[in-house]
Image: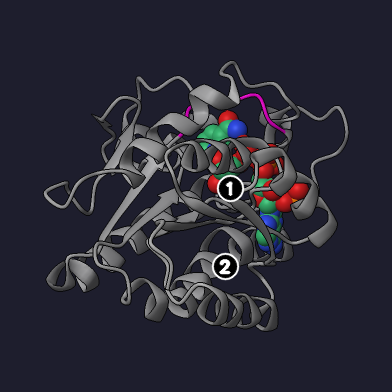
Amino acid sequence: MQDKPIALVTGANQGIGLQIAKDLAAHGFTVLVGSRDLARGEAAASEVGPDARALQLDVTDQASITAAAERIRAELGRLDVLINNAAISNTSKQPGQSVEEYAKTTRPSNVSLDEMRAVWDTNVFGVLAVYQAMLPLLRRAPDARIVNVSSGVGSLTTNSDPAFPYRAIFGPVYPASKTALNALTLAMALELEPEGIKVNAVSPGFTKTNLNGYAGTETVEEGAREAVRVALLGADGPTGQFTRWENQTIPW
Ligand SMILES: NC(=O)c1ccc[n+]([C@@H]2O[C@H](COP(=O)([O-])OP(=O)(O)OC[C@H]3O[C@@H](n4cnc5c(N)ncnc54)[C@H](OP(=O)(O)O)[C@@H]3O)[C@@H](O)[C@H]2O)c1
């Protein structure tokens, strides 16, 4: 077993995940750059630096998840930090279609169940499957952490407020997938509290990435900050929290 702490970031070949990988490497981690496409993962890992290794990991493919966990066990023996970052926002938004227009076609009354299932497969069930596979490795670390990259758009409290200006885009596909991820976060935190493994959710803020057609207003450096801060929390840090930079609580 090696001395350097080991982090796995899912969906780290681009966007916020890639920046989280770079930041954790800068903090002395050996970083496993999860990518569903190995070649893109290798390109990203070489961008991160010598302490990064590409790891083929499609969070919707159980064989890929199992193989990734086995490789970490064989090569590194444990996992100190798991960042569940991989997500998709949709599979069917038309080019040029605005978020508001897409939201109108994906209300509870008219949403395609296939569309909803595809997004939840990645954003919800994918996170749970990776959690189950990586937990034995996290349990072998002295002070493990899990960070689930969620979104403020999943907050039920915020969207229940008639004064919230963006509540029209709250719907069953991406926003509710993040609500479900928040619920999983709390369930994981409660399960692992007796073992001292911390599980928290963070929101990066509206960040310029492929996920939103680069319409975001924050840089990836800004989007990555809260996930990295929470990943580095000390042994006395909190668990079961949902925050945005810098340590602002978001209501569930
Ligand atoms: N950007 C924002 O404004 C914003 C706001 C709030 C929350 N977030 C959250 O931040 C996280 C990162 O998103 P981002 O903005 O950086 O988007 P992004 O640039 O599109 O990155 C998403 C990453 O997830 C990967 N991914 C998608 N499906 C996957 C699968 N089945 N298996 C493995 N990896 C998969 C993508 O891989 P490919 O390159 O192969 O597609 C990509 O590497 C997500 O959880 C997102 O919901 C983003």
Question: Tag 1, which secondary structure?
Answer: helix
Q: Which secondary structure type mostly characterizes the magenta part of the structure?
A: loop
Q: Quadrant of the N terminus?
A: bottom left
Residue 95: percent from left, percent from top: 88, 33
Residue 33 lies in quadrant = bottom right
Residue 90: percent from left, percent from top: 71, 48
Determine if residue 48 is in view.
Answer: yes
Looking at the image, in which quadrant does ligand 1 appear?
A: top right
Q: In the rendered image, which residue does mark 1 sit on?
A: 174
Q: Residue furthest top?
A: 217
Question: Tag 2, which secondary structure?
Answer: helix
Q: Is residue 136 left or right of residue 251?
A: right
Q: In the rendered image, which residue does mark 2 sit on?
A: 126
Q: CA distance from mark 1 to mark 2?
A: 14 Å
For the point 63% across and 21% down, the residue is 216
Q: Which residues are magenta?
A: 204-209
Q: Number of labelled discs?
A: 2
Return the residue nearer the eye: 228 or 87. 228
Return the residue nearer the eye: 185 or 245. 245
Q: Is 104 a magenta residue?
A: no
Residue 249: percent from left, percent from top: 24, 33
Q: Is residue 7 left or right of residue 231?
A: right
Q: Is mark 2 within 8 Å of ligand 1?
A: yes
**Mark nearer the viewer, 1 or 2:** 2
